């Protein structure tokens, strides 16, 4: 698993599988197209927990994403290294704000806000939710502190949800936190389709 903080480790593509039964499948690819992470999310879990594997054999869990509570509209998800139990950081969905325009707060291991992910303009967000749906792809700006340092852009494809991520300028954000955040976008926000 790549954990070095390089520009390349903060550039990747995440895709939801076209077909998957009894759960959802996501893959995270490097810029060269090599599989970096594999996610098979189980369906019908009361408390959200997502295992991120280092490959499709699912023999090694690289990261665990776990909701802090069962029912919470503005839920917080902790991202931990599976073998060491090290808390990498957390992502908190801004519940009420996200009705109109998706926003997530990125927090470090001590629950201090270190950045955020915010959906593009409110007008586009409203058009997407109420009129154009998957015909208008989502895009997000990734902030490190208050500075815009990256983008997460949904590809135009009404059949497969995929995000191209470029956070190469976000030198203080751990790649694993970014991967966890994008898996949450695919999993949680992807339900809005």
Image (cartoon, rainbow, N blue to C red):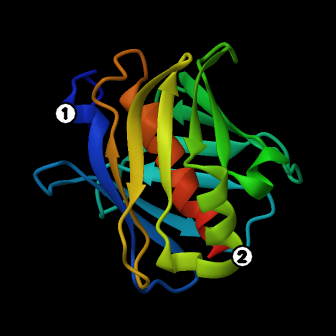
Measured from the top left, where is residue 103 in percent x and y?
66, 43
Q: Earlier in the sequence, mark 1 or mark 2?
A: 1
Up/down of 105 relative to 25, above or below: above
Give the residue drawn at x 44%, y 36%. Answer: 178
**Quadrant the C terminus occupies:** bottom right
Horizontal arrangement in the rendering, residue 128 relative to residue 24 (left or right) = right
The number of callouts visible is: 2
Measured from the top left, where is residue 31 in percent x and y?
16, 48
Displayed quadrant of residue 57 = bottom left
Give the residue drawn at x 48%, y 39%. Answer: 141
Displayed quadrant of residue 175 = top left
Task: Report the residue marked by disc 1.
Answer: 8
Which label was assigned to residue 130? 2
Measured from the top left, where is residue 3 in percent x and y?
30, 27
**Quadrant the N terminus occupies:** top left
Horizontal arrangement in the rendering, residue 8 relative to residue 49 (left or right) = left
């Amino acid at each position: 698993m790549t954990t070095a903080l390089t520009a390349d480790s903060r550039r990747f593509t995440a895709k939801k599988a076209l077909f998957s039964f009894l759960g959802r499948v996501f893959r995270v690819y490097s810029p060269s197209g090599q599989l970096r992470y594999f996610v098979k999310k189980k369906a019908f879990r009361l408390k959200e927990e997502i295992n991120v594997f280092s490959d499709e054999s699912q023999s090694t869990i690289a990261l665990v994403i776990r909701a802090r509570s069962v029912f919470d509209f503005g839920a917080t998800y902790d991202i931990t290294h599976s073998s060491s139990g090290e808390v990498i950081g957390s992502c908190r969905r801004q519940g009420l704000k996200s009705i109109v325009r998706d926003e997530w707060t990125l927090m470090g291991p001590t629950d201090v806000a270190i950045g955020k992910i915010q959906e593009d303009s409110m007008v586009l967000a409203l058009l997407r939710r109420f009129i154009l749906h998957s015909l208008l792809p989502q895009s997000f700006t990734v902030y490190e502190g208050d500075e815009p340092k990256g983008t997460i852009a949904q590809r135009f494809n009404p059949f497969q949800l995929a995000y191209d991520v470029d956070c190469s300028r976000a030198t203080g954000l751990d790649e694993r936190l970014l991967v966890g955040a994008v898996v949450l976008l695919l999993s949680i926000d992807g339900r809005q389709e």
